Image (cartoon, rainbow, N blue to C red):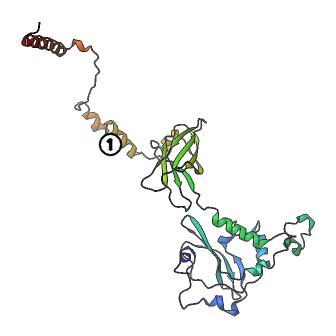
């Protein structure tokens, strides 16, 4: 499968051509005992008991295994959560996982897990009340648990738990107190490809409880993403609900997000002087950023600096001489036209 998409998804490399791992096929190394690694022991979905002691006792009761598919080395970034140990103490990866794209993938090269399933209790005994059996009897305790089924349920849920939904909404708060919060909604079609020409309506609930709606616009740099901005003025938590509909009005889905803000605390977020913000304010207002060691020179230069003074004058327009001159010019022009055309 090395040349197929499964080779890219797998967290382990395939065995090299012409080279077969000796431990996987050595009869003298069998049987294999299943063990959890330290990293696997801290993963809730890998364990089947509440504590380490109970998990160790469960592993001891698991049947030995006889076959493991040959695999290559573990890919960088992958995690080995379980191994099988040979009689000589050598280990072979048994459960290897990794993050792939926006999802997860796992490899379980053990080929005879059916031996474990053969020891599951009868269906009519699974789930019996623990009070009805003698807890001191290990055989009776196994009647209450269907470990293989529980393990496969946990593995399946872990694989699909973080699968992306068709509508995802996230609030990206800026570190700059003067910048708005970006509300980014990502929309996918039925094939989980970016969906364009969708209608995204975002409902924002500020701390005051006064809900209002805004319409997100398409981000032309990122297909399938729709962006809206909101300036958070009130202190507290903001709740966002995005509702997405298609061009024909059919509903695609919805998503929720939120963020908290405290504009008054922005001043104390950094102890260092925010020179970039001060320079931006000075440029926008026509001012100048003065260093502490240049204050004396700045004070000395004040008498020679030209300071623009703006005054507002309010007066009637008819009191201006040029208005009177225009009025007289119009009267003379009208009299001249009449005399020229012979009019009275």
According to the picture, the residue beneath numbered tag 1 turns out to be 293
Would residue 94 be found to the left or right of residue 61 on screen? Answer: left
Where is residue 235 shown, x and y percent of the image?
Answer: 56, 38
Residue positioned 88% across, 66% down in the render = 128
Instruction: Establish if 225 lies above or below 289.
Output: below
Instruction: Establish if 58 lies above or below 271.
Output: below
How many marks overall? Answer: 1
Where is residue 310 shown, x and y percent of the image?
Answer: 28, 25
* Quadrant the N terminus occupies: bottom right
Q: Which of 18 and 88 is in front in this view?
A: 18
Dividing the picture into quadrants, the one containing residue 165 is: bottom right
Where is residue 73 shown, x and y percent of the image?
Answer: 56, 81
Whether residue 52 is visible here, answered yes or no, is no
Residue positioned 65% across, 71% down in the render = 39
* Quadrant the C terminus occupies: top left
Residue positioned 50% across, 58% down in the render = 194
Instruction: Establish if 13 lies above or below 342.
Output: below
Q: Nearer the viewer, residue 176 or 9?
A: 9
Q: Residues within 10 Å of mark 1 (few under 14, many from 20)?
A: few
Where is residue 159 shown, x and y percent of the image?
Answer: 64, 67
């Amino acid at each position: 499968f090395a040349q197929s998409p499964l080779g890219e998804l797998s967290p382990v490399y395939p065995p090299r051509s012409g080279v077969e791992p000796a431990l996987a096929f050595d009869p003298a190394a069998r049987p294999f005992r299943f063990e959890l690694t330290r990293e696997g022991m801290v993963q809730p979905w890998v364990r089947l008991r509440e504590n380490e002691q109970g998990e160790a006792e469960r592993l001891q009761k698991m049947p030995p295994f006889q076959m493991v598919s040959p695999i290559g080395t573990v890919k960088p970034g992958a995690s080995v959560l379980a191994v099988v140990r040979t009689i000589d103490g050598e280990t072979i990866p048994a459960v290897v996982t990794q993050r792939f794209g926006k999802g997860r993938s796992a490899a379980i090269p053990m080929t005879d897990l059916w031996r474990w399933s053969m020891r599951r209790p009868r269906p009519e005994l699974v789930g019996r009340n623990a009070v009805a059996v003698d807890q001191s009897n290990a055989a009776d305790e196994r009647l209450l648990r269907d470990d293989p089924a529980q393990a496969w349920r946990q593995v399946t849920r872990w694989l699909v738990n973080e699968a992306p939904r068709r509508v995802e909404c996230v609030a990206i708060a800026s570190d700059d107190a003067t910048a708005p919060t970006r509300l980014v909604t990502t929309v996918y079609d039925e094939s989980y490809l970016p969906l364009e020409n969708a209608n995204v309506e975002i409902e924002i609930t500020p701390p005051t409880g006064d809900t209002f709606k805004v319409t997100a616009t398409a981000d032309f740099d990122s297909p399938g993403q729709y962006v809206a901005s909101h300036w958070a003025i009130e202190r507290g938590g903001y709740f966002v609900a995005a509702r997405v509909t298609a061009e024909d009005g059919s509903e695609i889905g919805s998503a929720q997000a939120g963020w908290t803000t405290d504009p008054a605390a922005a001043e104390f977020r950094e102890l260092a002087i925010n020179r970039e913000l001060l320079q931006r304010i000075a440029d926008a207002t026509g001012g100048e950023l003065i260093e502490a060691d240049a204050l004396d020179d700045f004070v000395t230069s004040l008498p020679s600096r030209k300071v623009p003074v703006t005054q507002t004058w309010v007066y009637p327009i008819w009191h201006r001489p040029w208005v009177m001159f225009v009025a007289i010019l119009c009267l003379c022009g009208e009299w001249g036209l009449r005399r020229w055309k012979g009019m009275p």
